[in-house]
Image: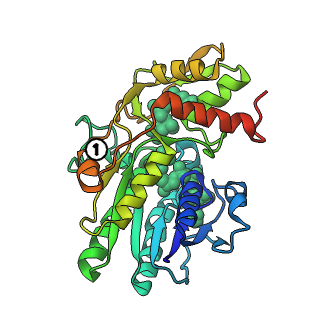
């Protein structure tokens, strides 16, 4: 069976991916610098002799052997990626060059986890893969958006120049167990606030929309994209059911059974007003569409936060 490197493997999505690949019989090398990820996320995999954990920052070259590389290393929460914007840019650009170099030497297929953020504050809705986006190159989100756009360009150009097997996935907002309760993203914030009986912090008036995908659905989409031979992408992977942040807050209150109040705070600069994937391409190319609805997924995430050391009571 194949040996697979997962960069960012100790993070939220990466830990689920490592788990699924091991269950399928692959050897998995998880590479992480633990900036926004945690050893605890992969602790349950440590006893498996097909699993290795390597502390490494992908901004530096990496010399390993593998058949496939999933490149997930990059903080995803706005709070985390704006903590050190220059480092975020380096991770998506220098880090991507390093991982492409590794893939080239090993003749490995490499999948880049891009983001719906490449569409910026979109004026086309829902977003299809052929939409070029509306990104502020100077704004507070640009270290992430523009880094991910350069990474896509790097993948395409390594493919054209060297015939490399690259795959590009644009991930839309994904949530579920192991999303760090303190990382600042909306689903973990709302659930933790609801469990603690603290006010749910809606940024702005709450009319902005996002489309939330449950982690198991997302991982299935990533693996199908990696394992098909026909298309380098990009392909949108996300749940096309769109909700306002007010609707999300109400859903969280209902699922958690909390009577916490809702409060409104300032909307961050450049916060996209709407976000919804057109998943026609994923359906046709991968036969993929989400299976888990929002309330079921929120229930599973809530169980996780209740059961971990982040005990909210
Ligand atoms: P996360 O922050 O939980 O995981 C990212 C992981 O990468 C962490 O374990 C972190 O320590 C590691 N990392 C960061 N910089 C690194 C570096 N320089 N070298 C090595 N490791 C490094 O975030 P996530 O939600 O699991 O996101 C994983 C990937 O998916 C990211 O690339 C993100 O941009 C992309 N993505 C996620 C979402 C989402 O909704 N979760 C949406 C769009 C794109
Ligand atoms: N948001 C919110 N309250 C929070 C955290 C986020 O209302 O406590 C909003 C945020 O302004 C954005 C949406 O929720 O409109 C999604 O934010 P997140 O940081 O999860 O993801 P992104 O903005 O990158 O899509």
Residue at the image position 79 percent from the left and 27 percent from the top: 313
Q: Position of residue 81 (x, y in %)?
A: 54, 50
Please provide percent x and percent y for residue 175: 52, 40
Height in image: 102 above or below 130?
A: below
Q: x%, y% of residue 174?
A: 48, 43
- Image check: 73 left or right of 51? left
Residue 203, position in %: x, y? 51, 25
User: Looking at the image, which residue is at 66% across and 40% down?
Assistant: 182
- 265 and 38: which is toward the camera: 38
Apparent side of residue 107 relative to residue 17 in the rendered image (left or right): left
Residue receiving disc 1? 279
Which quadrant holds residue 304?
top right
Q: Write the residue at 59% across / 15% down.
A: 262
Q: Is residue 207 visible?
A: yes
SS assignment at label 1: loop
Q: Residues within 10 Å of mark 1 (few under 14, many from 20)?
A: many
């Amino acid at each position: 069976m194949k040996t697979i490197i997962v960069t960012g493997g100790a993070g939220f999505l990466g830990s689920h991916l490592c788990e699924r690949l091991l269950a399928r019989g692959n050897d998995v090398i998880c590479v992480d610098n633990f900036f926004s990820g945690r050893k605890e996320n992969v602790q349950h995999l440590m006893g498996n002799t097909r699993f290795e954990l390597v502390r490494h920052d992908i901004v530096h070259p990496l010399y390993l052997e593998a058949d496939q590389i999933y490149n997930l290393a990059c903080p995803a929460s706005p709070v985390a990626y704006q903590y050190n914007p220059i480092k975020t840019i380096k991770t998506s650009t220098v880090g991507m060059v390093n991982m492409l170099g590794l893939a080239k030497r090993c003749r490995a297929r490499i999948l880049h986890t891009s983001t719906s953020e490449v569409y910026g504050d979109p004026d086309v809705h829902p977003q299809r893969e052929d939409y070029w986006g509306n990104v502020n190159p100077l704004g507070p989100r640009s270290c992430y958006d523009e880094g991910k756009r350069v990474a896509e360009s790097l993948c395409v150009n390594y493919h054209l120049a060297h015939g490399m097997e690259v795959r590009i996935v644009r991930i839309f907002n994904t949530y579920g167990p192991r999303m760090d309760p303190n990382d600042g993203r909306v689903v973990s914030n709302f659930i933790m606030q609801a469990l603690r009986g603290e006010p749910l912090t809606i940024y702005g008036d709450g009319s902005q929309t996002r489309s939330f995908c449950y982690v198991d659905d997302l991982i299935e989409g990533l693996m199908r994209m990696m394992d098909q031979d026909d298309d380098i992408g990009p392909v949108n992977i996300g749940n096309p059911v769109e909700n306002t942040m007010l609707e999300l807050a109400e859903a969280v209150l209902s699922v958690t059974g909390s009577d916490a109040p809702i409060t409104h705070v300032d909307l961050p600069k450049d916060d996209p007003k709407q976000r919804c994937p057109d998943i026609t391409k994923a359906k046709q190319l991968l036969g993929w569409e989400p299976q888990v609805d929002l309330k079921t997924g929120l229930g599973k995430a809530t169980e996780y936060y209740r059961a971990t050391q982040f005990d909210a009571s």
